[in-house]
Amino acid sequence: MPVNDRGATGVSEMTENKKTVEQYMEGFRKSDHTQILSCLTDDVEWEMPGAFHLIGKEAFDREIESPAFVGRPEITVLRMTEENDVVAAEGSVRVQRKAGGFFDAVFCDVFIMQRGKIKRLISYLVEVK
């Protein structure tokens, strides 16, 4: 479960943009392509600096599940921060490698939102060994 920024009262409002990001993350947890794609604009961009830069839902859909891994990923969002139409989500991910063992990583995903949908995603991912 995500832990969101909290205001002075200790209560955080879940904005439309944060709800979309949470729905997107839950789609990845379930390997639910339809749920993930419903969170995106048609011309979505997904960039992982140094790894890839994809444009469009079709390209995004092909990258959702990697043949190097099996099963569903365990995704933990530690914090979501929002300013204007940008949501940053920090957390960790763990997934079983097809060749054996696990891939453990920490991430910071930066979502640029447009009318409650993900327009651009920049994913920073570091494997933890």
Image (spheres, helix red, strand yellow):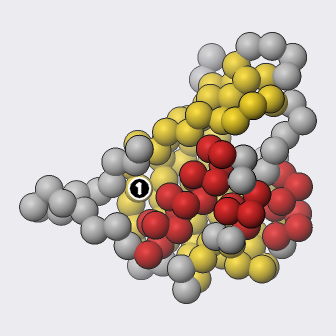
For this orientation, the residue located farthest to the bottom is 115
Provide residue 8's location: percent of width, then percent of height: 11, 61
Tag 1 residue: 80
- Residue at the outermost left position: 9
Q: Residue at x 29, y 56 (%)?
A: 5
8 horizontally vs 82: left or right: left
Q: Who is closer to the viewer here, 72 or 87?
A: 72
In the rendered image, residue 76, in percent from the top left (x then y), is placed at 49, 39
- Which residue type does callout 1 highlight? Met
Residue in the picture at 72% in, 53% down: 32
Q: Is residue 44 or residue 35 the one in the foreground?
A: 35
Q: Secondary structure at mark 1?
A: strand
Name which quarter of the figure residue 62 lies in. bottom right
List x then y, in percent, for residue 70: 80, 29
Q: Position of residue 66 (x, y in %)?
A: 84, 40
Say whether residue 101 is left or right of residue 77. Answer: right
Tell me which residue sits at (48%, 78%) in the image.
85
Q: Is residue 95 above or below residue 39?
A: above
Circle 1 crowding by C-alpha within 10 Å: few under 14, some 14–19, many from 20: many
Q: Nearer the viewer, residue 47 or 119?
A: 119
